[in-house]
Image (cartoon, rainbow, N blue to C red):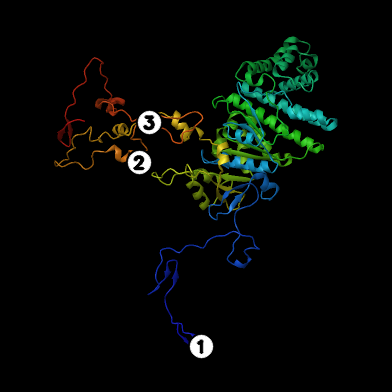
Amino acid sequence: MPYNVDGPVVHPTTDELTTRGWTGPGGGQVGHADPPSLWRATTVQACGLWPFAASATAPTTGVPLGPHLRTGTTVCGDPISWFARANYLSNPSMFMLGMPGLGKSTLVNRMLIGLAATGVVPMVLGDLKPDYAETVRALGGQVIRIGRGVGGVNVLDPGAMGRTAHRIGGRAGEALAAEAHGRVLNTLTALISVVRSGQVDDHEQAILSVCLNLLTERHAPGRPPTLPDLIRVLDEGPPRLRSVALDRGQTNRYQEAVDPLLRSLIGILSGALGSCFAGESTTRMDLDAPAVCMDISRIGEADTQLTAAAMLASWSDGLGAVAAASALADAGLAPQRWYLTVLDELWRPLRAASGIVNRIDALTRLNRTMGVGSVMITHTLKDAAALDSSADRAKADGLAERAGMVVCAGLPERELEDLSRIVHLSRAEIDLVSSWSSPEGWNTVDSAGGAPGRGKFLIKVGGRPGVPFRLAVTRQELALHDTSARWSEEARAFTAPAPTAPELTMKLYLPEVRSPRHRPHVVQGSHGRPDPSVQPVDETAWAAQAGWATRPATPSGWAPEVARPHPPVPEPHQVPPVESTAVLGLVGSRRQRRSPSRPEPEPGPVVRDGRPTSAC
């Protein structure tokens, strides 16, 4: 640059600096200007970089979850830490939405493991798959199984509340015993409502309350009554019970009052629920356990009555244990503990019993006073629309509205637009989350990440911008929780049938395509030249791309104690006779029924483009 007495001589120019370099002669051009690298540091360490430093948008309080999708910083969070430690939330609850198979339960398992390390007690009150039983076992917790042949629950057992009331004593113990009595009564009436598909009348509730008091007086504190004992008291009809039933000294009036209850209770014992609720509880909940899981996965999806009854019993026993632990803490007999309840597959318990809706609704309103955080997981907001009662639908609609934090996995765009009426979602956030629910293209190769969008989530808190992140899962967590274990390579190696041969599949769906072995000629076009649209196909050229094996299977050396690293190669499919491949001509209205004794007709010439050709 030339200089003079006044400094450098600057000539006017039209050159400009762009993202591809300097414009003008000799400026040169680059293909792409890389953005500067992002680094994370404290204000003390990065003070010399100001003003080129920016604050990170990822929260750092709570359980470590994974890297931010844009900045790469570690995202931390859970409903209890954000409520009690960071003061981000006004309600320690989380509502999660997402399509199946995108890692929702894996994310919750990460939160359970992280919170258990800080002293929070995870409680899975009704594990339907199960998704959390192995995690609870690894944490040294208690797994209580409910189902036919595996375990039962005594709905008349006051559980931890009854034992704690006897331990505390005094007025506090009497108050807790009265609360335990009311909880048992509510669970019993809800169970009867499930069996009879109707509500329990007020005079029936009064009769049941007196029966429970009589049974408490007759039985020792360590031996709770059972449903057969309740039926026996109703059949006997003590004077106190008859006075509540308003028999007026007439036996037939008493029988008319208690017969509906007797029929319902006998239906419980003799019906589908008898094996799970007829006797004493198989396992009692331990208040000192670091984690608790009520495993009801042995109950089939179609068995709605037993599912509803097991969910009601699980929630009654679990929340009763929370109330008992709080009473011990108030009496100075135990430290105060925090709990995190998990309700996965929310649509199943909501449809199973209306009593579950009331309990979840009460928990989301009173969890701050109870010291309990809640996590609810479902697939869509439309689950509430399937409830029978309008009152239940209104209660279910408020679950997402009262949640302190909402976490979204991959969802369709329409579902996100419905969710934006509850939690503000920008257009960019809707486009981002909806892109996680569909693959990028049909010819994508297999990757370790699995399905598109798996492990990607967006956290929304009120009107704040969402925090997108990818869940970083360790091998230990994958070993404890794998919802696709039945689709693994080892499972497919020994259980899956051999796939259909590619040659037969091509013949079924593309009857014009034949291999050179079965098609010795070339189809002629309209001008006597070979038709380029129909060409012989060499199976060996595309079999590897389609995932088919072209070599015969070798004898397996697998033993139970040694896992084979790769699945065995299936045997090559035997090519059936030519006439058996004409399947499409035998389907639907075009199918021709032939007599077994009638010989098959000889294949005649096939007319194509006005010229006869030989049939394949």
Residue at horizontal 21 percent and vertical 34 percent from the top: 519
Q: Is residue 611 visible?
A: yes
Circles 2 and 3 in contact, beta carbons < 8 Å: no
The residue that disc 3 covers is 554
Quadrant in which the C terminus is drawn: top left
- Residue 181 picture location, percent across and down: 76, 26
The residue that disc 2 covers is 545
SS label for mark 2: helix
Between marks 2 and 3 in the image, the one whose residue lies nearer the viewer: 3
Q: CA distance from mark 2 to mark 1?
A: 73 Å
Q: In the rendered structure, which amino acid carries the disc numbered 1?
A: Asp
**Viewer-side residue, 49 vs 611:** 49
**Viewer-side residue, 339 vs 36:** 36
The residue that disc 1 covers is 6
Res. 225 mark: none
Earlier in the chain: of badge 3 and badge 1, it is: 1
